[in-house]
Image (tube, grey):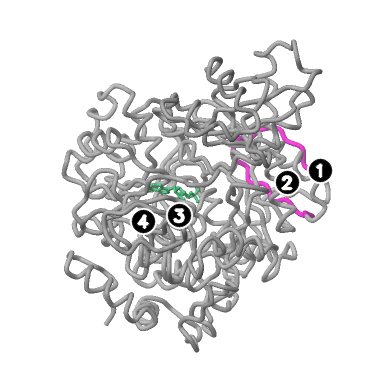
Amino acid sequence: MSNYHIKHLEEYYKVYRKSVREPELFWEEIAEEHFSWRKRWDKVLDWDFSKPEIKWFEGAKLNITENCIDRHLRTKGDQTAILFEPNNPADGPEHITYRDLHERVNKLANVLKSQGIKKGDRVCIYLPMIPELAVSLLACARIGAIHSVVFAGFSSSALASRINDSECKLVITSDGSYRGAKTIDLKGIVDEALETCVCTTHVLVVKRINSEINMKTGRDQWLAPLLENAPTECEPEVMDAEDPLFILYTSGSTGSPKGMVHTTAGYMVYTAYTFKNVFQYRPGDVYWCTADIGWITGHSYIVYGPLANGATTIMFEGVPSYPDFGRFWEIVEKHKVTQFYTAPTAIRALAKENLDYVNKYDLSSLKVLGSVGEPINEEAWHWYNDNIGKQKSPIVDSWWQTETGGIMISPLPYVTPTIPTYATLPFPGIQPALMDENGKELTENQVEGRLCIKFPWPSIARTIWGNHERYKDTYFSAYNDKYFTGDGALRDAVGYYRITGRVDDVIIVSGHNLGTAPIEDAINEHPAVAESAIVGYPHDVKGNALYGYITLKETGEGRDHDNLRKEINQLITDRIGPIAKLNKIQFTNGLPKTRSGKIMRRILRKIAGKDTGNLGDISTLLNPECVKEIMDEAL
Ligand code: WT7
């Protein structure tokens, strides 16, 4: 018998030990007892981190939507699957039952087929947080098409590069989106992007804001009339365990975004099992994750994990500040939310507002509070614990990544005693390792090092779309036979982990993972810019904000700096999106470099963070004199 639901700490340790000693048996039991398979696997696990090649449940056949929808119909057909809370509270909510969801997914799946989409084709989804977004993911999965969701805050060129990288044939979008009091012209962004995408021949458009938009003949169609005529049953495509389910792009420290590829069976088993335990979900609970489905958190813990457990999952279209800063808590009260999962940046932003926005509402339904996306600082942790959880709801600080597919290190609420800022213990099946500078594993407790994982888990990304070499280089070449996360961590005396942050050039701003290279590339496109370096510095709401050091070409000398700053941020907005804008821009005459010409970001990071007490040895720099100048003029 598997321990699908872990209820006590001793049970956790027992399950954990089993997951390490007999990983194959452990995962096999969970897979066997809690999912529907069209055909059983021949082998539970096959892996070689040196290639790297990882296969889970090889030979098995299934469809993830049968597991997320069909198998709940008999017992939960009338239960709400997705509870949609629109941007404007007066326009909702909408309850979508498992039966409704089944019909909507099947219809859209049939529409996709009618547009020529087949198993293995890539479909780009660029939609706001409306039910059609979740339905689109599931409709793709129904017919074996690979979805590639692009967060609807990305610019047209960021969208275009993602569409082109995975050669999406079809794009699903909407006429526009609501964001608080504003509307955004999503279709216009898609039109601009598609000017450079020859692979895309079809665009399906959801009507959301009733705006006037251009419809390109032969390419664009409104979705509603197509759905109206579509049959309500679509036989699920029978997929192999290792068939790709989706691609999701994430930033790297260098180069273009990486299209992480997640496959079917392992991803399903792991997201379902972690959802059940990390949120201690019980029938009747109303679970709410505030993330956008454009990120992995939304894929795994708004859509697949909750639905695989037959849960009720809320989708919120709006923002925490509209109509006012009480919106989150109003929703918690209205729907008697039991599990609430958000990001530290949202907590810090709301903690700045008057407590009346919180205290007006009855939050007594809450049982579990979650945090994800970046380290949660002590102050935010206490504010969350005192004012939202009333010191009764455990906080699960869950550490994971786009690449890991599911939660990796996290307390289990009511099971694992929590400590502020600690992600605590590895989830069953996860074998973390801390490595020292020389690539040696630190096996004792009370150590700090680089966080690796030694053994595969079912939802690890299998490759980077179209670039397996890069997958190998990025994750499996730093340390022998280990997956390297890019994060630093410490392990305390009892074996609890605390994530200390990125050790590479990825910067997490408001919970969004931003690589420095694409931002620098965008800046360098400006005709007056010679060179640039981006670093993060501590920011009380965003966690980190971006600080740019920019040197100008001769032609740029004497130009109005405030204007230049605006133009540079506009370029970043156009190339990536507003989330990547720089908070501070300092123009300098030079950037500190090593003798081999590498920019010394470590020094720039210290200056940006006003931590210049110990800059380390700068005498070996190519141009040590520029450090003083940069310090004198720092913002
Ligand atoms: C990076 C991954 C996984 C969902 C959202 C982000 C940081 C994530 C935590 C946490 C400290 C965290 C890490 C990680 N991170 N959760 N609980 N404590 N840091 O996914 O965009 O792929 O970013 O987010 O640095 O590597 P992502």
Q: Position of residue 625 (x, y in %)?
A: 61, 22
Give how far apart the Cα atoms at labels 2 and 1 are.
9 Å
Give how far apart the Cα atoms at labels 2 and 4 are.
34 Å
Give me the residue at 65% from left, 13% from top.
562
The reply to whether dot 1 and dot 4 touch (C-beta < 8 Å) is: no
Give how far apart the Cα atoms at labels 1 and 3 are.
47 Å
| Helix, strand or loop status at disc 1 | loop
Q: Is residue 71 magenta?
A: no
Q: Looking at the image, tell me whether mark 1 or mark 3 is earlier in sequence order.
A: 1
Q: Is residue 154 visible?
A: yes
| Helix, strand or loop status at disc 3 | loop
The reply to whether dot 4 and dot 3 touch (C-beta < 8 Å) is: no
Q: Which residue is mark 3?
A: 437
Q: Position of residue 530 (x, y in %)?
A: 75, 27
Q: Is residue 521 above or below residue 539?
A: below
Q: Residues within 10 Å of mark 1 (few under 14, many from 20)?
A: few
Q: Which residue is mark 1?
A: 195
Foreground label between 1 and 3: 3
Q: Looking at the image, tell me whether mark 3 or mark 2 is earlier in sequence order.
A: 2
Q: Position of residue 527 (x, y in %)?
A: 79, 25
Main SS of the magenta segment?
Answer: loop
Q: Amino acid at mark 3?
A: Glu
| Helix, strand or loop status at disc 4 | strand
Q: Is residue 149 above or below residue 523?
A: below
Foreground label between 4 and 3: 3
Quadrant in which the N terminus is drawn:
bottom left
Where are the magenta residues, as a range? 200-215
